[in-house]
Image (cartoon, rainbow, N blue to C red):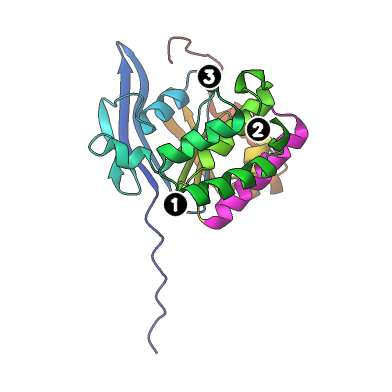
């Protein structure tokens, strides 16, 4: 009887290999490798100055790597920047919205940039405003939004056009418990749809529960990588991701690193 064949895993949506970046003598990122496949949530953690923000900026094309390669669904971020960036829904750590647009106008603008058909854009925007509970504020200028409302609007904008990769940098910051729960529910829905998600966060208990795998970086290099069984084993052993973080990272912060 022929042995059954195990299906090959899907190709990664995000593939980062040999990534390096220096700022003069400071090594911000030194030989980083990452992969995220459809339906996976990668938690990227590390001390302040570990190289997380620099990595995010290279993935999104804001910084050029000194060495290494980044592809998004097979598109090289350097050789095919527009094709790669169209596939990324990105929320930066410091959210900056167009202050003289209303919330709806901002989402309409993003839909137009992403070439979403008008009827689909209208339905998607109505759905997102409702899911994030900001429908009542949709006609207010974004400069009037609270920090939490602005962050929810930014995440909604990142979902326009259903990009296959979501990159969220400290996107739970500034959210009250109800808003954070709403965002986590939406992330679970996106994962079920097959979206690949990278979440950079210091809120380790959330990552411990949500992530399919967590990568810990320190001084620009991967220190440890934990898949879902390894995360479950931490809990079973009576420890936490916070304990793991403290045990495996340096107590000294390198303030010179971006």
Q: Which of marks 3 and 2 is nearer the N terminus?
A: 3
Check disc 2 and report its element: helix, strand or loop: loop
Q: Residue at 53% x, 14% y: name it.
A: 252
Give the x, y percent position of residue 137.
70, 30
Are dots 1 and 3 in contact, CB under 8 Å? Answer: no
- Dominant SS of magenta comes to helix
**Mark 2 to mark 1: distance in Å?**
34 Å
Give the residue pinned by disc 3. Answer: 48
Q: Estimate the spatial distance between the alpha carbons at disc 1 and disc 3, rounded to whole Å.
A: 26 Å
100 vs 81: above or below: above
Judged by depth in the image, the label closer to the viewer, 1 or 3, is: 1
Residue extending farthest to the bottom is 1
- The image shows residue 150 at horizontal and vertical percentages of 63, 26
- Contact between marks 3 and 2 (CB within 8 A): the answer is no
User: Could you tell me how many numbered marks the image carries?
Assistant: 3
Mark 3 vs mark 2: give the one in front.
Answer: 2
The N terminus - image quarter? bottom left
Q: Is residue 192 magenta?
A: yes
In the rendered image, residue 8, in percent from the top left (x then y), is placed at 38, 65
Query: Between marks 3 and 2, how big is the CA–CA gap?
Result: 35 Å
Q: Which residue corresponds to the image point at 43% horizontal and 14% vertical from the top-left?
A: 257
Q: Which residue, given by chain and number where applicable, does mark 1 sit on?
A: 37
Front disc: 2 or 1: 2
* Residue situated furthest left in the rendering: 79
The disc placed on residue 222 is none
| Circle 2 residue | 138
Q: Which of 239 and 187 is in front in this view?
A: 187
- Disc with the residue nearer the chain's start (1 vs 3): 1
Residue 233: in sight, yes or no? no
């Amino acid at each position: 009887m022929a042995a059954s064949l195990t299906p090959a895993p899907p190709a990664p949506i995000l593939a980062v290999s040999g990534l390096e970046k220096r700022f003069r003598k400071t090594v911000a990122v030194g030989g980083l490798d990452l992969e995220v496949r459809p339906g996976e949530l990668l938690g990227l953690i590390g001390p302040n100055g570990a190289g997380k923000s620099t990595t995010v900026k290279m993935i999104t094309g804001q910084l050029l790597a000194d060495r290494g390669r980044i592809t998004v669904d097979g598109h090289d971020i350097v050789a095919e920047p527009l094709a790669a960036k169209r596939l990324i829904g990105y929320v930066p750590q410091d959210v900056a919205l167009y202050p003289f647009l209303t919330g709806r106008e901002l989402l309409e603008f993003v839909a137009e940039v992403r070439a979403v058909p008008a009827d689909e854009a209208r339905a998607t925007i109505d759905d997102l405003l409702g899911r994030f509970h900001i429908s009542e504020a949709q006609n207010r200028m974004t400069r009037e939004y609270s920090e939490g409302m602005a962050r929810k609007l930014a995440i909604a904008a990142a979902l326009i056009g259903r990009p296959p990769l979501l990159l969220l940098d400290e996107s739970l910051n500034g959210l009250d418990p109800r808003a954070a729960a709403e965002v986590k529910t939406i992330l679970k829905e996106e994962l079920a749809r097959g979206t690949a998600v990278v979440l950079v966060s210091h809120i380790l208990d959330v990552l411990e529960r949500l992530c399919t795998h967590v990568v810990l970086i320190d001084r620009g290099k991967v220190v440890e990588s934990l898949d879902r069984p390894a995360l479950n084993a931490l809990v079973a052993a009576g420890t936490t991701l916070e304990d793991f973080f403290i045990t495996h990272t340096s107590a000294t912060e390198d303030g010179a690193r971006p």
